[in-house]
Image: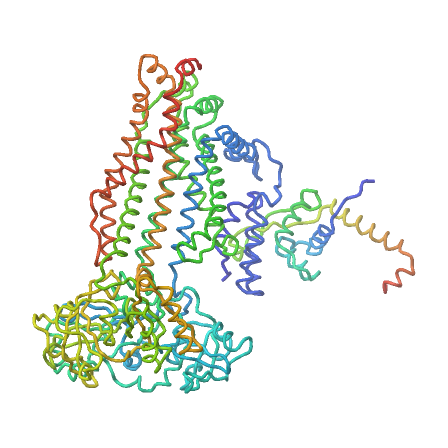
Amino acid sequence: MKRAFLGEFEEVVLLTVAILDEEAYGVTVTQEIEQKTGRAVGFSTVHTTLQRLEEKGYLASRMGGATAERGGRRKRYFTVTAAGRKALAEVKQVREELWNALPPQTLQLMGG
Amino acid sequence: MPYTPPRFTTWLLKTFGHPDTSEEVQGDLLELYDHWVKTEGKQKANWRYLLNTLKLLQPLAKPRYKESYTSRNRSGEPAVSPFSLSPAMLLNYVKIAYRNLLNNKGFSAINITGLALGIACSIVLFLFILDELNFDEFNKKASQTYRLYVHSSINNEEANNAKTAPPAGPTLVQMLPEVLTQTRIGYFGVHELRFKDKIFRENSIYTADSTYFDVFTLPFVHGDPSIALKKPNSIVLTETMARKYFGEENPTGKSLLVDGTNAYQITGVMKDFPDKSHFRCDFLLSMSTYPEVNQQNWLQGDYSTYIVLKEGVDPARVERKMQQVILDRLGPEIEKALGFSMQQFLANGNVFEYRMQPLLSIYLHAKRQYNIDPNTEWGNARIGDSMYVYIFSVVALFILLIAVINFVNLSTARSEKRAKEVGIRKAIGSSRLKLMGQFTTESLLMTGLSVLVALFLVQLLLPGFNQLAGRQLTLPLFTNAYTLPSLLAFTLLVGLLAGSYPAFFLSSFQPIEVLKSGVQKRKSSLRSLLVITQFSISITLILAMIIIRNQLGYLQHKDLGFNKEHLLSINNGAALGDKLKAFKAELLKNPAILSVSNSSLLFANGIPGSAYLFGKRSGTDPVLCQFLDVDADFVKTFAVPLKAGRFFANNRLADSTAVVINEAALRAFNTSNPLDQLITEVDVNGSKTYKIIGVLKDFNYESLHRQVRPLVFHLSPVRQATSILNIRIQPNATKKAIDYIEETWQRFEKTEQCHYSFSDERLARLYESEQKTSIIATIFSALAIFIACLGLFGLAVFITEQRTKEIGIRKVLGASIPEILFLLSRQFITWVAIAILIASPIAWYAMSRWLDNFAYRVAISWWIFALAGLLAVGIALVTVSFQSIKAALMNPVKSLRTE
């Protein structure tokens, strides 16, 4: 079976969109990632990643929610598509398989 | 209220961001910007905003949809006119431009060389101009700061003096609420400073008020600027000086011994003065060391006073209010000194007022706009000249214009070759606009290449130019954020300027006509006009160059009224102190030394002046004279002829109350019989009266920018800080004399070197700025004519090529070679002749204005124009004749056979 390929950052962005549920757009995603992972993320990076994920079909988007704060411009809200959910699940599964394959003594050495 | 990010960045994003996602991206970034400002501050937010924007610009941002010939935007509507701006088409323009470049290597080389030279010249000149601008802007309160100066008109003699009376500044702060603070700077003279075993004589020591650092912004390395100059006997020194005396350790708290007697405590170390400061010094002494400065003495004047006004105050109003305050205090003193009331003094048509000059205008405009007598700008004030800034701006523009004209001319001249291409492109469906776009791309490419070559040239030539012009110019390519964008803008501007006409012209061809028969030859009157413009400019520059050189030669060889040859001066005579007389006697023992005279400073700024009354002790008509302190050997040493009476004698005691005047003073006193008359030097602390015993013929003791002014000689030990020993030596024994002087000096003065110079060299230094201008003018007029000739050469190549057949036929029919040469050169010579006619009056007018700077000047005679004309015609002929001779000598069989 051809597995979905997700880059590490793509995965983080996709997950964040899923976490934010209805409230996911460029700004919230950027801020959420910064908060959760503690690393400084450029908005431009997040934006291009969101674009790419939509192109790949993992995200769907709609426009809406203009506020005065944004000079009356609409936001592009993102939601995770079925394909996106599937891709996330696959990635998680691969991770878990790998973790499970770890010999117990190594796990102990790592303090786990 | 949300914060607004930088407008330019927003514009960038809006214009160059991907159109499909433009709306939400702009909105998101606005929201984020707001967040950044709140959390990280405005500067950081601006930076992040810019960074993110840059990354989102095409082509860095990934396009959402693949390019297609009729690309759609998100809503599915076809985009407007997509094809001509598609990368494929743009690439094609560049490719064609590149092929054309290679195809016509000769033309390309001429074009690029000319443009590159022109651009390099303008960059260098621009750097030069930039170096003269923005002086004193580093001071935080620069725009509120003014320097006081004294404007007077006594007996219709106008004078503007940069130095003011000592109580002026403090009085104004006290009396006018608009004046925030003030500081005075006074020259302290040459003194010996000592710390342990380090002894140096320093000549850049000034006294300044404790408020100095409130007016001028100079960061401190050690110490506190607000209190550094408060206490008496405090001294602040620059970082360089601190290193000289103390090495790397912090000197605050230590003491410097001045002249071996007074100890001054170091209270601070300031950073060295910035290059762009009109005033610079090494040491600042606290003014409070000399409480006598604060006495009411309004007639004395040797302090520079700077005042700072409160924000938003109208300076003109302050200047008006100031007059009464000053008159109230000055009046009584004038009355005491002259014996007349101030009202009477003013009623006689005399003027005496304090004025204000903005700090920012001092460096560039003191001379021209405020007419301040450079003689009163002594001290370490650096004074520039706005005139040279204008001259060089014009020259830079002109040279650029010549280069651009080359480009336009050669491009249109070559149009025939490209006519077919234009026809085919049009037939296939290209619109005129697109063709213009193509040709503009080509010229932009050429300009871009030229700018690169020019940058290389500038880097290569700047060191040499710096040496000639005495500057330290650098091209801050990467260190200054503005350089690259401005270069880019400059490239665009020049490219469009040079490319717009050829683009317009070439794209105008009708496809049917050019495809059928090629371009019909048309006489381009524009081309003649452009060539004439080029040569007018070049000839004007040549004329200017000849006249400047002429004037400089005149200055060097003019009879100054004394013998300047074999005259040597030791400029630090003050170092000898009491041993001066003995040193003089010792020097005279050597036969190579004819005569020695000790005098105050001449041939430089800072010659003091005073008011003198002739034949009376009081009156409203004092004459302003400069004075020199000399000894009895002055006349013998300088070889100035006596007009009447006698000079001072060594052994007459009575001569200390006698004076000698010059002819200019004689005229100013308006007398024909001056001998044994009395003159009174006006001084508030008791005027002194002297008897005139002789009149010297006028000689130029100042630069030749000025007429000889009234001068009074006093027989007295030199009262100023600078005491000069003038030495006349035996004509053929220069080396011997110098060796002897140095050796004797070393016997008398152990610590300090002997600083001597030849008088003719010191005189030449008075015209340094003119010398440098002359060099720069020479270089740039040579380059201008070279660039113009490059263009002419290109045109000649082109025109002779066009007329190959005509020449062949003429030769077959019996034309001689000279006839053909004449035929080919006639047009060019006509152009140059017209240019001479245009350039001559312009150059005459401009150079007359320049010569007005000199009291002694050459006349602009007709031969200069004839010479410049001949030169221009000659150069043009030589340029053209390469081609025309080749064409004229060609075998007609060959030229007629080519088809």
As drawn, B44 above or below B214: above
- Location of residue B38 in the rendering, given as x and y in whole percent from the top left corner: 56, 65
Q: Quadrant of the N terminus of chain A?
A: top right
- Location of residue B728 in the rendering, given as x and y in whole percent from the top left corner: 29, 68
Image coloring type: rainbow
For the question of whether residue A107 can be seen, the reply is yes
Depth check: give the residue in front, B633 or B675. Answer: B633
As drawn, B654 above or below B802: below
As drawn, B493 above or below B651: above
- Location of residue B251 in the rendering, given as x and y in whole percent from the top left corner: 51, 80
Q: How many marks?
A: 0
Which quadrant of the structure image shows residue B523? top left
Depth check: give the residue in front, B249 or A19. Answer: B249
User: Residue at coordinates 49% horizontally, 31% vertically from top-left?
Assistant: B105
As drawn, B202 above or below B868: below
- Location of residue B824 in the rendering, given as x and y in whole percent from the top left corner: 32, 24
For the question of whether residue B181 can be seen, the reply is no
User: Residue at coordinates 44% horizontally, 15% vertically from top-left?
Assistant: B898
User: Residue at coordinates 43% horizontally, 35% vertically from top-left?
Assistant: B111
Q: Quadrant of the C terminus of chain A?
A: bottom right
Q: Is residue B324 left or right of residue B16?
A: left
